[in-house]
Amino acid sequence: MSGLIVPSGHGRKLVTDKQEVTFKVTAADGSVISVFEVVVPPGFDVGAHTHHRSQEFFYVLEGELDLLAFEPTKRTEERWQDWESPDGDRVVRAGAGSCMFVPAGTPHAFRNATDKPARMLFQSYPSPDHERYFEEICEIFSAGGSVDPDAVQRMRDRYDISQITPLRYEPPIPSTSHRAPEREA
């Protein structure tokens, strides 16, 4: 029997302006979990959601992500960043080396609120659910224009994802303080 070694920079890549996903270990490799390396651009917010049967694990490799993994005292439909658990848990700004485990049924979310990309290792059980999800979401993201929330919802319904707050991609506006002064005509 043999294992699998995937060198740095290798694996099947799905790239859009909203996300870059590299498949590291998949159902095709005989794995019951899917493992991905994900680059999360500034301004990307996956939105709070739950899975009825899936478990997930996130490990921040570079950069910072806002992470949430708890049932809040009150769910709001627009924003999850202000949620609080009955025990006083709040959203965490997590840097490299931080991780988040999400049991089935637990509301969770991540967002890159910084002006630099973040990179994370992401594991999902069971495979190949998230493999197919990433293929479809990248198709939606690559279609151009704004993301169709109805198309995203239909796709998420197929993959055991109950969305609570919206997926958003709002890249930071570049600072104008570094621009050269305009010349008068």
Image (tube, rainbow, N blue to C red):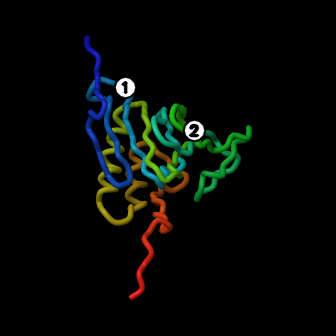
- Inspect this view and state whether residue 12 appears: yes
Q: Amino acid at mark 2?
A: Thr
Residue 138 spot, x, y in % from top left: 32, 50
User: Secondary structure under badge 1?
Assistant: loop
- Sort mark 2 into few (<14), some (14-19) or many (20+) by Cα contacts within 10 Å: many
The residue pinned by badge 2 equals 106
The residue pinned by badge 1 equals 32
Q: Quadrant of the C terminus?
A: bottom left
Q: Which residue occupies 42% across, 34% down? A: 121
Q: Quadrant of the N terminus?
A: top left
- Inspect this view and state whether residue 26 appears: no
Residue 90 spot, x, y in % from top left: 67, 43
Tag 1–tag 2 contact (CB < 8 Å): no
Q: Which residue occupies 48% across, 42% down? A: 63
Q: Quadrant of residue 29?
A: top left
In primary-sequence order, the first of circles 1 and 2 is 1
Q: Which mark is residue 13?
A: none
Please determine whether, in this image, residue 31 is positioned above or below residue 184.
Answer: above
Residue 27 spot, x, y in % from top left: 30, 29
- The residue nearer to you, when weighing 21 against 10, is 10
- Residue reaching furthest to the right: 87
Q: Quadrant of residue 28?
A: top left
Q: Which residue occupies 42% across, 86% down? A: 184
User: Secondary structure under badge 2?
Assistant: loop
Left or right placement of residue 75 versus residue 11 in this view: right
Q: Which residue occupies 54% across, 33% down? A: 98
Please determine whether, in this image, residue 46 is positioned above or below residue 9.
Answer: below
